[in-house]
Image (tube, grey):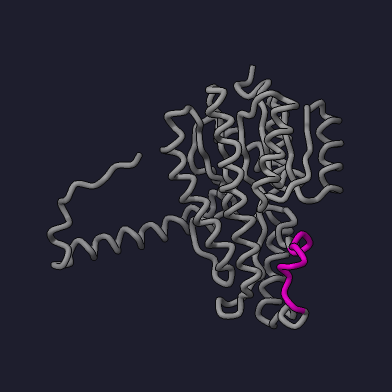
Amino acid sequence: MSQFSGKTAVISGGAEGIGFSVARAMGKQGMNVVLGDIDVAQLAIAEKKLKSEGIEVLTVKMDVTDLAQWQNLAKKAIERFGKVHMLVNNAGVSSKPGVVEQTDDKDWRWVLDVNLMGVIYGTQTIVPLMKEHGEGGWVINVASMAGMVGVPMAGAYTATKVAVVGMSESWYAELKPHNIQVSVLCPAFVKTRINLSERNKPADLKESKESQKPSATSSAIAKHMQNVIDNGLAPEIVGERVVEAISNKELYIFTHPNYRKVVKKRYEAIDAAFERSESSPLLAGVLNEKIADFS
């Protein structure tokens, strides 16, 4: 019997894309799934699909940027299934491509609220429930390859994904004594609708019609991104990969091994920077100091 059988997973942004693929994959392992999503129509479609496959599912309309809505979802999950054992912080949006000085403040706020605060609120709400029942569990935060390598013209998105990777590393050590395993999923391009994130943007955070007009550069980038996403990895593979990785207790979950050389190049540059610091006479007294080990 699967180690996941009979347990319950909460998945934000679970109505489609990566979130739905993880829900289906965990459901196939015998888990109950609780899907939170802002898109009611898509939630209904997801619920129907999962039920047709014999998966126990509860759907809750929610906005991840609202802590009270997270608390409401948690309450309903406990009422329906008794306990929560897994949290998948999946809900995320993409920022509009553009140079830093032309990125609208409202766009920054929206991306930060969904991609960063949504993860924080989800973790603050669900982890205490796992600690309470004492059976351990899993926290899977969905970041991106942008969390490993900065993406030009996507500062807001990159900032949030780097933060999610860092928080996951922090929580990995923090929650280990509670038998709560933390993993961070860092996919490259997956065939989802993340490039159409603006459809769910709150009216009060939308830019003026004038500022919404795309530049020639941002239009070209958007067109290229659409093509890349259309040819991306099937979401179904990502869900199965998550099951595989957390079964192996992996902290970093990668779905695109072809990006290894890109990430390796970054860390080689970091290592070279450390070498240069070692040769600096200004830092000679620091070299042999004892370091703090947080692992």
Q: Residue furthest front?
A: 68
Q: Provide residue 192's location: percent of width, then percent of height.
A: 73, 53
In the image, 105 versus 216, the foreground residue is 105
Residue drawn where x is 86% and y is 30% of the image: 52
Q: Provide residue 239's location: percent of width, then percent of height.
A: 66, 39
Instruction: Give the position of the C terminus as an image quadrant.
Output: top left
> Left or right: 88 with respect to 49?
left
Quarter of the image for residue 266 reads bottom left
Quarter of the image for residue 169 reads top left
- Seen in the picture, residue 149 relative to 96 is either above or below; the reply is above
Quarter of the image for residue 51 reads top right
Residue drawn where x is 48% and y is 48% of the image: 167
Q: Provide residue 222's location: percent of width, then percent of height.
A: 70, 71
- Seen in the picture, residue 210 relative to 274 is either above or below; the reply is below
In the image, 197 versus 192, the foreground residue is 197
> Left or right: 294 with respect to 226?
left
Q: Which residues are magenta?
A: 198-208
In the image, 257 versus 178, the foreground residue is 178
In the image, 203 versus 280, the foreground residue is 203
Residue 201 part of the magenta segment:
yes
